[in-house]
Amino acid sequence: MKKKTIIWLFLLVAGVSNAQIPVDSWREHFTFLPTIVATQGNGKVFAASAFGIFSYNSADGTIGKITRINGLSDVGISAIAYSPYKDLLLVGYENGNVDLVYERTVINIPYILQKPMSGSKRINHFFCTQDDKAYISTGFGIVALNLEKNEILDTYFIGSGGSELWVNQVVVHDNMIYAATANGLFYAPKDDPLLIHYDKWSVDVSIPNYQFEISALVAFNGQLVLSQIQEDSSPDVIWYKDDLGWTILPNAYQQIRNLWASDNSLTVCSRQGISIFQNLQTQPMVIDEYPGYGGFKPNYALVDGQDNIIVADDYYALMYKSPDRWIQVSPNSPSNSRAYYVLPTETDVLVVGGSRNSAWGNMWYPLTLHSFSNQSWSTFINSDYFDPVRIIASPFAKNEYYVGSWGHGVIVYKDGEITEWYNPENSSLETVIPGAFCRIGGMVFDKNNNLWVTNAGVNNALSMRTPEGTWKGFPYLNQIGSNRISDIYTTPWGHLWVVLPSGGGLFVVDPGDSPEIMSSHKTQKLQLKDKDGASLSNDVFCLAFDRDDYLWIGTSEGVVVSYNPEKVFEPGGMSMQRIKVPDILPGYAAFLLEYEAVTSIAIDGANRKWFGTSKSGVFLQSADGVRAIKHFTKENSPLPSNTINHLAIHPKTGEVFIVTDMGIVSYRGDATEPEEIFKNVYAFPNPVRPDYDGIITITGLMDKTNVKITDVAGNLVYETKSLGGQATWDGKNKQGERVATGVYLFFCADSKGEQSAVGKILFIR
């Protein structure tokens, strides 16, 4: 059991948080769509997506949210419930994890997550009782949790012979426990001390088609009400039990999502609409739209004690009706979780949401472009195109971007709309087979603003578009020898480097002074070998050129570096090697990330290397790659997954945007791109208030700036050197003590002693 302090992040309904986040802190960029489940308690409504929970207080219009960043232990939320008896929110996950969310703390209950078993551990539902118990419905059975001691009481395997059985929901009614399962309705006396024995549980065979799956179950007006899935794909049906037995409601429902019972009503939520019954003998009120809103796709619905209607919806997150009008409630977020590649720019951060499958085929995701601007997310979706996998900024116009699609060629996006589409009909781009199979692996603009595009699986494996708009294709497929072509990079000396995944190695082109003429090109296909000629992994994922123009290569077996890539076409050629790093066993050599598939590399303002991996999260290494600085995983950080698709660093803020297969998070690093001169030098936060104990940052610096911090009497308090354009201070003096209230001066001098800057920081204790 783990206990964690939380601080709910509160927002106005229409507002977003725009505070600058401190160095060494995280923020999430998870989607809150679709919202899958809702509940209510303590005057608030709670709604959950797979990635987080938000609350809504209708009295003051505030939204609070909680994710892995500020308290939750996991992602993949599958169920929530509020216990009015303990004033806590229960959160369940697909993997069996459970969180108990109190006002200021989260207690993690990992019992089910850690339970060794082969079947599903999914948390499907919670039912809380007055005697401080919660019955947890799971993919294998029922788990009883003591909410007073926060410990597991019992586990009930109620399938045949004590086997696992999928349980959708539990209700305690008239001192009986009823379980809605994949094999019908099971029941047992609540206080039977031998409930752990499967033979204490019975199946209610009085229900017609009693062996059919029961998807939901509630007690309403003293009667059991359940929804039953029909095996012939007929509409779901609802049964209720009175003194005469089971009676079917005459209404038909497609895909019932949930039942909710309050003192005054029964709510039935299905894909086709929401039905609210005052009693079971009269026709319900039916909701099949939100007037004034275009879409309608409810996932979960309930009516609270004040007869407000609350709906968790695919399109709108949370819809709330009180008393006679609908309002939409949602934290700002990307509109879906699809994220594959990120591009930070001076003003925005853009993320494309396409993908490729493991066989390098299409995922058929609609063109999705998430934009983070002024601390707010917006999403552009166009279903006429699909699988965007790369995005680069245009050198020709502000807010113009080139998007590479794995099927639809190159798309130009500007100011919220598509302005150009380059395809086999109007360019040298080609398609693998007739149709939408013009697959773009990567794009880059060279120093002359020529656009170079890799085109997978076709003869013209490389194409170029001049600034004047002329396209030229180059039939390099045979020379490349692979249908799988990915990213392309350019160097300050004009070479083009192309990644050939799945063992292809690298392909290098020197276009020369006449890039449109193929005969003027120099080319080289490279198989990765070290300086002694020993073969290295040719399963290349990514490249990066650092601030010294060294080449760093991410492969399926770690990192390879070349300190002279500019010599690739010279007689002696370039050299490659792996980086030796300290090993835990003396006398044994180890190589940088040799057991990791390195999927992405980014270079920060201090020339340090950030490595994203396929299964082990993110590594930060020193500029030479030898020294480990940080290692972020799902287990020790807010990363939602250890599978990293891409990462990139905002040049001005040093914020590292990390795209995982489970969404986007960012971490504000302590290095930024250095300035050429001291420019807009300032410290933040400033003033430093009593409740802040984090890092103070001085930014706007030149590379390797010497920074001295003194009190107003001139006594030296702290001294450091900037990482790129930024220096940090923990607010402590040389004795490791937090400094007292007062004004502190910082003095900055460049590494040559030619330029300087001065500023003040106010500490309030």
Image: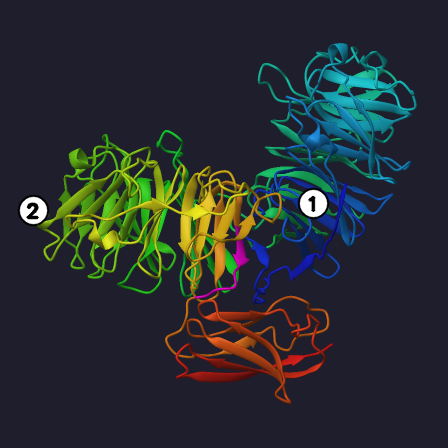
Labels 1 and 2 touching (C-beta < 8 A): no
Residue 93, position as x, y percentages in the image = 66, 36
Q: Is residue 668 magenta?
A: yes
Going by the image, does 252 lie left or right of 169?
left
Residue 360, position as x, y percentages in the image = 35, 32
State which tag comes first along the sequence, 1 or 2. 1
Q: Residue at x 73, y 62 (%)?
A: 60
The residue at which mark 2 appears reads as 519
Determine the residue located farthest toward the bottom in the rendered image: 713
Residue 293 appears in the rendering: yes
Instruction: Give the vertical position of 398 relative to 648 (above or below).
Output: below
Instruction: Give the vertical position of 653 relative to 526 (above or below).
Output: below
Nearest the viewer among 419 and 582 is 582
**Bounds of the magenta segment:** 665-672
Question: Which of the 4 quarters of the picture holds residue 734?
Answer: bottom right
Which image quadrant: the C terminus? Answer: bottom right
Which image quadrant: the N terminus? Answer: top right
Going by the image, does 2 lie left or right of 705?
right
Q: Residue at x 59, y 33 (%)?
A: 272
- Display coloring: rainbow
Instruction: Give the vertical position of 343 relative to 217 (above or below).
Output: below
Residue 137, position as x, y percentages in the image = 74, 28
Residue 428 appears in the rendering: no
Give the number of the disc on residue 310.
1
Q: Secondary structure at mark 2?
A: helix
Instruction: Give the vertical position of 732 relative to 119 (above or below).
Output: below
Measure the alpha-carbon separation of dots 1 and 2. 67 Å
User: How crowded is the residue under tag 1: few (<14 C-alpha within 10 Å), some, or many (20+)?
Assistant: many
**Amino acid under label 2?**
Ser
Q: Is residue 605 magenta?
A: no
**Amino acid under label 1?**
Ile
